[in-house]
Image: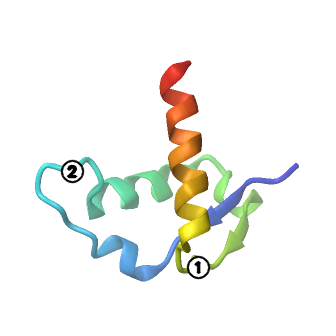
Amino acid sequence: MRTAFVTDPSHVAHVSPGHPEHPERLEAIVAQLEARGLRQRMVDLAPREATDRSEEHTSELQSRLHLV
């Protein structure tokens, strides 16, 4: 089984005060994946627009994970 890597250049531009996601964090993650030889073992996937159905699935999954 391979791991997918989903990203877009616009993700680095995402800045939201007080939120843990910020450009430096994403850049550091990618740098560590590359340094450890993991990045090249991943399958690249382009991001896609979220739909109402994907939002339902994400909410359901997050609820389950919070119960664990």
Which quadrant of the view contains residue 46? bottom right
Give the side of residue 43 with respect to residue 34, left or right: right
Tell me which residue sits at (52%, 61%) in the image: 55
In the rendering, which numbered label is found on residue 25? none
Give the side of residue 29 with respect to residue 5, left or right: left
Figure label count = 2
**Quick one: label 2, few (<14), some, or many (20+) residues within 10 Å?**
few
- Mark before the other along the chain sequence, 2 or 1: 2
Considering depth in this image, is 65 or 56 the residue closer to the camera?
56
Considering depth in this image, is 34 or 61 the residue closer to the camera?
61
Numbered disc 1: secondary structure? loop
Tell me which residue sits at (55%, 74%) in the image: 51
Can you name the residue that lies furthest to the left here? 17
- The colour mode here is rainbow
Name the residue beneath numbered marker 2. Answer: 19
In this picture, is 47 found above or below 55?
below
Question: Considering the image in quadrants, where does the C terminus appear?
Answer: top right
Residue 6 visible to the viewer: no
* Kind of residue at disc 2: His
In this picture, is 38 found above or below 27?
above
Considering depth in this image, is 37 or 58 the residue closer to the camera?
58
| Real-space Cα separation, disc 2 to disc 1, in angstroms | 22 Å
Which quadrant of the view contains residue 34? bottom right
